[in-house]
Image (spheres, rainbow, N blue to C red):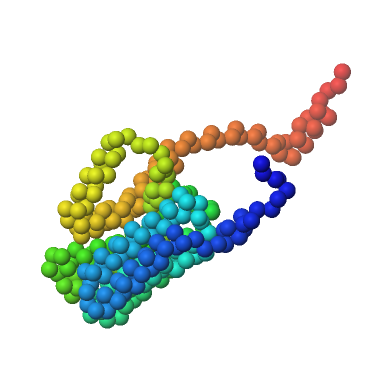
Amino acid sequence: MGHPDRMPLITPEKRRRGIYILPNLFTTAALFAGFYAIVQAMNQRFEVAAVAIFVAMVLDGLDGRIARLTHTQSEFGAEYDSLSDMVSFGAAPALVMYEWALQDLGKLGWIAAFIYCAGAALRLARFNTNIDVVDKRYFQGLPSPAAAALIAGLVWVGIDNGFSGDELSGYACALTIFAGVSMVSNVLFWSGKSINLRKSVPFIVIIALVLVFALVSSYPPGILFGLFLIYAGSGYVIWALRWKRRKDKRANAPVPAAAPAAPAPQADGAETSAAADDDTSPRN
């Protein structure tokens, strides 16, 4: 039988400030994958670096889910995850792309890489400050893992098809700037947080997941790069549809009826003339 007056051994405040092994283990693994990508890019092993960024994406997606499922969220974990994301999805993709394709572009190359890196930092800072005030169904701006997947996907696809970084430097520069700007934009992207993993699903959903895994495994570089390109474009499609809906709504809005005109006031001269006529009229 519990005692209502007895203080708990671990207060909720201390629990939020605690450090939990399981979710932070995945965060550390994601941080390692991002650092490993930087090291491999310095050793000119760009394909391995691109794969390491995708591995960091998977690990980053797991740590938050595990923390929520096991009720081990903490302030430390949230801050640690942001710092890990900055390395894995901010610095690592920028450096990998710079070493692979942007280095020979001179100032334009390192400026494009910096735009991406700064965009990732600003995106993470805005996410942390707006986490309690935004719609959970959407991300404001392209998520940094998806932006990193665009960069790593282009590197992976290019190498797999025998292209060098110099041959794709123009596309690489444009995609890097696009990813960096998209991260700090106000365009909304579907977050997927409305999916409840604890809820039962129809059998057809399991079959669809099997088909997705089979499709990705058939050609991982191209399929992954294509999927994230579609996701990056989906936000702008949503923005265009909402803009068109607002425009049509304003165009079809009923025009308010004009108020009836008030009677014109009588001039002072007319009033004086009327009074004079009354005075000069014959009296009975």
Answer with left or right where residue 44 lies relative to residue 133: left
Q: Residue furthest left?
A: 162
Q: Nearer the viewer, residue 276 or 270?
A: 270
Q: Is residue 247 above or below residue 145?
A: above
Question: Which residue is pictured at 52% across the width and 63% down the height?
Answer: 19
- In percent of width and height, residue 110 lies at 32, 78
Question: Which residue is pictured at 51% across the width and 56% down the height?
Answer: 73
**Residue 281: in sight, yes or no?**
yes
Q: Is residue 267 above or below residue 129?
A: above
Q: Residue furthest top?
A: 284
Answer with left or right where residue 15 lies relative to residue 176: right
Q: Quadrant of the N terminus?
A: top right
Q: Residue furthest right?
A: 284
Q: Nearer the viewer, residue 284 or 130?
A: 130
Q: Quadrant of residue 139?
A: bottom left
- In percent of width and height, residue 257 lies at 53, 34
Q: Nearer the viewer, residue 220 or 116?
A: 220
Question: Which residue is pictured at 39% across the width and 48% down the height?
Answer: 192
Q: Quadrant of the C terminus?
A: top right
**Residue 151: in sight, yes or no?**
no
- In percent of width and height, residue 220 lies at 20, 57
Question: Which residue is pictured at 48% across the width and 35% down the height?
Answer: 254
